[in-house]
Image (spheres, rainbow, N blue to C red):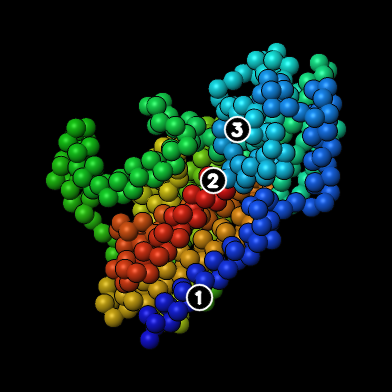
């Protein structure tokens, strides 16, 4: 009965997500595939393109003029939404289809300024390195068009050259994730676009192989004997070990579990902070990363507590020391995995389905929170919201990996189809909301 209810909840949630996405698309896209903008946005966009015409000295821009005197520079990290913004502008102003498009990493700002061409930049300062350099010049953008989460600005330089910037608001208000650009994988020739995916695969392999890695490391370094490391690698913490408690003021306090949660919070917060700023520490980002990690760990503990009370279960959070190391390594590689700890349960086969349901619920709620904050960040972007999205989605993403001791292994064992569905949904959502949308 419990399994049937769980499937029904999952199917209804999945259908609701599809309907919500379709509704959002219908509200923001016209029948011919062009993004729908407000009348004020269209009016200001027309003003900007009239300014381009005046700059070129032509009321009607011909194809040859467009090819020779205009250039589109796409940012290194423009989102799918910014690409759609440019596509919609091309449909509204077909002459843009004749304009040469290049990437920001293939050109220098000085070259663009010497060319005297109209420069159309796609991507805000955090998505386009040329936009970042332009905005540092403290220019006054005399024409601005804004609709929903999109923004188009234009200005005329002293030389008479016009600069237009197409961006979403996050290109200005969010921050660039530095780790993917400073990853050792980039120095090996891998494009930053593929770093998160490859880093995730390598970190997942570490999860799978860490006992053997310990043994091999011991053999080469000769710090410990191989026999000791082998037993250490296979060692499992018992629930009784972590569940030792003390009674204070009438409350049961699991001191070892609380200490484990604090350490896990600190390590994961530092790892996510590194993903944003690298070694150039931003203490505000670091502070909020630790606060959000602690808040989510606490929320998940409350959910676990409710399941324990309702289903008569017994589980504790166990710090995973080796996992803390994997978490930090994954951050350096370019995509942080939350492997600092896991839920440890009693060895009671009768409760395995209920425990798997508990893990599924915690993971699903965590990702749902990330998606909700993502949509808020679209309309009112802020780097603090961006940090929360990374923390929450990273937690959920790591937990669907079907490698013990991650919860994904228990969920897969409980119900393969449920695991397959949430694995696809959560992994796809994670990469979309953090790197592509």
In the image shown, does 354 or 153 lie closer to the viewer?
Answer: 153
Q: How far apart are marks 3 and 1 (CA)?
A: 38 Å
Q: In this view, does 147 lie to the left or right of 350?
A: right
**Residue 33 at x, y percent in the picture:** 64, 52
The total number of labels drawn is 3
In the image shown, does 376 or 391 lie closer to the viewer?
Answer: 376
Query: What residue sits right under mark 1 in the picture?
Result: 12
For label 3, the SS is loop
Residue at the far left: name it.
227
* Badge 3: residue crowd in 10 Å (few <14, some 14–19, many ≥20): many
For label 1, the SS is helix
* Badge 1: residue crowd in 10 Å (few <14, some 14–19, many ≥20): few
The dot on residue 75 is 3
For label 2, the SS is helix
Q: Quadrant of residue 358?
A: bottom left
In the rendered image, the quadrant that contains the N terminus is bottom left
**Residue 134 at x, y percent in the picture:** 72, 25
Q: Distance between the residues labelled 3 and 2?
A: 13 Å
Q: In this view, does 202 lie above or below 359?
A: above
**Residue 236 at x, y percent in the picture:** 26, 59
Q: Is residue 289 left or right of residue 59?
A: left
Q: Which comes sooner in the sequence, label 3 or label 2? A: 3
Q: In this view, does 167 lie above or below 363?
A: above
Query: What residue sits right under mark 2 in the picture?
Result: 436
């Amino acid at each position: 009965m419990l399994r049937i209810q769980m499937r029904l909840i999952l199917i209804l949630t999945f259908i609701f997500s599809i309907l919500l996405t379709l509704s959002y698309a219908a509200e923001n896209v016209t029948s011919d595939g062009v993004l729908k903008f407000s009348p004020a946005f269209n009016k200001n966009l027309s003003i900007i393109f009239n300014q381009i015409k005046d700059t070129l000295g032509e009321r009607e821009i011909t194809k040859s003029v467009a090819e020779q005197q205009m250039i589109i520079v796409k940012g290194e990290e423009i989102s799918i939404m910014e690409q759609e913004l440019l596509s919609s502008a091309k449909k509204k102003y077909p002459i843009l289809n004749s304009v040469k498009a290049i990437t920001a990493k293939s050109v220098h700002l000085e070259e663009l300024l010497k060319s005297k061409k109209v420069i159309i930049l796609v991507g805000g300062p955090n998505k386009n390195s040329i936009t970042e350099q332009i905005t540092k010049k403290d220019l006054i953008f005399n024409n601005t068009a804004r609709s929903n989460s999109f923004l188009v600005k234009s200005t005329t330089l002293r030389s008479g050259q016009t600069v237009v910037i197409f961006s979403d608001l996050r290109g200005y208000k969010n921050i660039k994730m530095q780790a993917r650009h400073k990853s050792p994988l980039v120095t090996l020739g891998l494009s930053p676009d593929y770093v998160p995916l490859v880093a995730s695969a390598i970190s997942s392999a570490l999860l799978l192989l860490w006992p053997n890695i310990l043994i091999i490391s011991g053999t080469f370094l000769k710090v410990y004997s191989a026999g000791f490391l082998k037993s250490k690698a296979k060692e499992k913490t018992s629930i009784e070990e972590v569940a030792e408690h003390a009674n204070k003021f009438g409350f049961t306090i699991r001191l070892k579990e609380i200490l484990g949660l604090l350490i896990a919070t600190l390590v994961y917060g530092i790892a996510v902070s590194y993903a944003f700023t690298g070694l150039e520490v931003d203490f505000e980002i670091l502070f909020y990363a630790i606060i959000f990690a602690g808040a989510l760990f606490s929320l998940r503990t409350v959910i676990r507590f409710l399941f324990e009370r309702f289903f008569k279960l017994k589980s504790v959070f166990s710090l995973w020391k080796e996992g803390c190391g994997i978490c930090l390594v994954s951050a350096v590689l370019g995509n942080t995995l939350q492997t600092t700890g896991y839920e440890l349960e009693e060895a009671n086969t009768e409760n395995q389905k209920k425990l798997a349901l508990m893990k599924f619920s915690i993971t699903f709620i965590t990702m749902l929170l990330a998606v909700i904050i993502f949509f808020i960040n679209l309309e009112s972007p802020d780097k603090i919201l961006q940090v929360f999205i990374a923390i929450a989605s990273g937690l959920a993403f790591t937990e669907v990996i079907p490698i013990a001791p991650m919860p994904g292994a228990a969920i897969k064992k409980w119900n393969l189809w449920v695991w397959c569905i949430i694995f696809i949904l959560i992994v796809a959502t994670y990469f979309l909301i953090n790197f592509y949308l």
